[in-house]
Amino acid sequence: MSIAELESREIQLERPQGLWSEAWQRLRRNRGAIIGFGLVGTFVLVAIFAPLLAPYGPREQNLSLVREGCCPGPSADYWFGVDALGRDEFSRILYGARYSLLIGVVSVAVGLTFGLILGAVAGFFGGIIDGVIMRLMDIMLAIPGFLLAIGIVAMLGPGIWQIMIAVGVVNIPIFARLLRGAVLAQRENDFVLAARAVGVPRRTILGSHILPNSISPLIVQGTLALATAIIDVAGLGYLGLGPQDPATPEWGTMLTDTIRYLQTAPHLAIIPGIAIVLAVLGFNLIGDGLREALDPKLRGRA
Amino acid sequence: MLRFVVRRLLLLLPILLGLSILVFLWIRALPGGPAQALLGERATEEAIAQIEREYGLDKPIYVQYWRYLETVLQGDLGQSVTTRRDVTEELRQKFPATIELAIAAMLFSTFFGIPLGFFAAKRYGGTFDHFSLVASLIGVSIPVFFLGIILKYVFAVQLGWLPTVGRIDVLIELEHPTNFYVIDAILAGDPAALWDVLKHLILPAIALGSIPLAIIARITRAAVLDVQNEDYVRTARAKGMPPAVVDRRHVLRNAMLPIVTIIGLQVGFLLAGAVLTETVFAWPGIGTWLVDAIESRNYPVLQGGILFVALIFVVVNLLVDVSYAFLNPRIRLS
């Protein structure tokens, strides 16, 4: 490397890019992440504009369409076919996006909020508080996530709010552990020591110094948790623990009885399933892309 | 090594104790309390009062907990509300079915996952690598039950190659001394029954094993890529060791550590994922048992089943930790 090159490097170093703008640049070049944003964007738009896009209502029945063999498949009038009660599958899928998105976001928000508080408190204060909180989290992690969710739904009774709470609670220890680790790593940093030395109150240090610096692993985990939440919610719905009104167009619930019609109407099972896969795939792609983009080890290699 | 194992075992105690408290409190948080949970919704006041006296439910909560702990430690998990049989007895019958399925799924995912990840790393950046990345990404995005339904549709309904439900054809008679049907068939020396049992295992095992397969392939790929650039691998190549020997003796052996860990960590997923897989294939294991228990509000079964599964999960994680320490001296000495 020539001296001129070395100098030009140093000049570059004088204006370092921020973590976020650099991450954004890397994310834009990640083909997988772009596909992920496309899928999730479509998913969100469909959820918002479902009433405008859907040709029929999600509960609208036309029993004359259902013949003995059950349920005609896709046609020009009914793009994704008709279900066992004569409802338009396409409209139900569009409306179902609302439920999956809402349930996913709310349950991750529940897990994130409580996990954030518990993890931050445990990591920042340490000592007995840390011990008690983290042992509690260990106990929750000792039950496989989906089973814990089933146990909670069994306690609260089936229903849409109940599955949101259940999936949210399952997420709490994951976020708490993650944040505690990040806080512990930040606590010993010089800028925290400096803030402490000049007498900044603990709460302010936690809120304005430690948390902002621990945020990137949380964003990655949050995105991936959304993917898992959608799968878990669909699983609970499939087991019949979701919305108790069977007319609710929730994707998992829509799959429940389809095995009976597998021979005559496979579209009833395949279409909601593909909708779930695409939504989950979208969040997974974004999560993976974000992880690579925000990884400090990869910084500057863009 | 012994000190490490003892220390990990001691750390396990508070977790198990906490778990028992959680499960104990869980049944007390049910609407109507445990007496109603036991008797069902239409129980009369007197019946509830009698049950509460009988089971000591009128005593202070810590006394109740102590009694609960005593009975559980004696291996008594109560009685199923629907069948009136001991929960432990039903467990003994259902658990082998789930384990058999989990082992089959694990074998499937390891046998395909490790080679897939290995060859993807060997052809880093090539077509096969890209293909395996895309495949594993889709693999982790498919819900277990949806994959189960699809497999059932293609191989059972459309092609008719494999059976759709259960563990064995109803017309085949087989004694079940172990409840592991594969072992039972071998013990009975009945090749036709063994073949039938294996045919029933294939689809559920693939459905359950697909996500672990994707994860194992990803980890193997990353581990092999890591190890491949190590100095000792370069040295081995430089001294003229045949590439296949380098791969086997240096690359794979050192890449095995993270792979073994991740395989162990899949056990929790297999136990939980089995709930959905078993429902799709009407597999008479712990999963269908628990789901039926929710529908019939069979709380003793739920309580005992969840406690038992959590116990298995914790113990397996411990074994993974210990084997990890066994493979890597740096951990047990730190």
Image (cartoon, coloured by chain):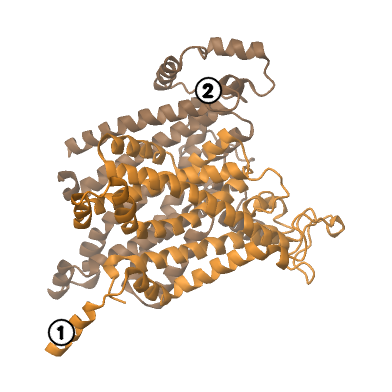
Chain colours: A orange, B brown
Q: Are marks 2 and 1 on the same chain?
A: no
Question: What residue is shown at x 45% (from left), y 72% (from top)?
Answer: A32
Position of the C terminus of chain A by quadrant: bottom left
Element type at mark 1: helix
Residue A190 x, y percent position in the rendering: 19, 56
Q: Is residue B65 above or below residue A216?
A: above
Q: Amino acid at mark 1?
A: Leu
Residue B112 x, y percent position in the rendering: 41, 60
Q: Is residue A9 above or below residue B249?
A: below
User: Given the image, what chain letter belongs to the residue carrying mark 2?
Assistant: B
Residue A213 x, y percent position in the rendering: 31, 58
Question: What residue is shown at x 51% (from left), y 52% (from top)?
Answer: A229
Element type at mark 2: loop
User: Farthest residue in the right direction?
Assistant: A64
Residue denoted by label 2: B86
Q: CA distance from mark 2 to mark 1?
A: 77 Å
Q: Which mark is residue A295?
A: none
Residue denoted by label 1: A6
- Between A232 and A136, the residue placed more toward the observer is A136
Question: What residue is shown at x 47% (from left), y 26% (from top)?
Answer: B25
User: Farthest residue in the front direction?
Assistant: A199
- Between B32 and B128, the residue placed more toward the observer is B32
